[in-house]
Amino acid sequence: MNIFTHQKTNKELCGNPLLVKEDFSRVELVTNAKMAVDESGLIHGGFIFGLADYAAMIAVNHPNVVLGSANVKFLMPVRIDERVVAEAQVDLKEGKKRKVSVIVKRGDVKIFEGEFACFVLPEHVLSQGLQKK
């Protein structure tokens, strides 16, 4: 399936899509030293959130999808050179709102889970006058 949204996303920082089908995506991220916050090799949680957000966006897969809110839990730390995989599933379609569940795993171990409220807008968010001038 083609990806219709977030097409310029940096795959090194947010993950590489492995599977995209209607209302579902699977995205892989291999962490690297640029993502580390200290000498122990701990990865900043923002990269894991970015992976999950990207997976949610391409599960919805609409050119005008945006994130409205997220309720997430970080369950385990991630280190440099680990492979983590996000799976996103659209659970609810109600008007312009989409509720997307995302689970990120390292192997069989769940390291992150979240629920993302996404919105499919009639036009690009920056075309709607919402940005500050």
Image (cartoon, rainbow, N blue to C red):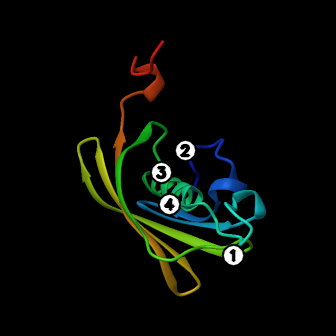
Could you give the CA–CA distance between mark 1 and mark 4, rounded to whole angstroms? 16 Å
**How would you rate the neighbour count of disc 3 (Cα within 10 Å): few for under 14, some for 14-19, many for 20 or more?**
many
Q: Is residue 94 above or below residue 131?
A: below
Instruction: Give the percent coordinates (x, y) of residue 123.
Output: 41, 27
Please name whichever residue, 128 or 42, is drawn nearer the observer in this view of the structure.
Answer: 42
Quarter of the image where one finds residue 33: bottom right
Identify the residue at horizontal 64%, vertical 65% (top origin).
43
Which badge, 1 or 4, comes first in the chain's sequence? 4
Q: Earlier in the sequence, mark 3 or mark 1?
A: 3
Instruction: Judge depth for marks 1 and 4 and give the one in front.
Output: 1
Can residue 101 be seen in this snapshot?
A: no
Q: Give the image location of residue 68, x and y in percent.
A: 35, 43
Q: CA distance from mark 4 to mark 2?
A: 17 Å
Q: Which mark is residue 57?
A: 3
**Residue at the spot of label 4:** 52
Picture layout, residue 32 above or below residue 127: below
Q: Where does residue 117 sit, x and y in percent of width and height?
A: 32, 50
User: Residue 55 vs residue 100: left or right?
Assistant: right
Instruction: Read off the residue under disc 2.
Output: 4
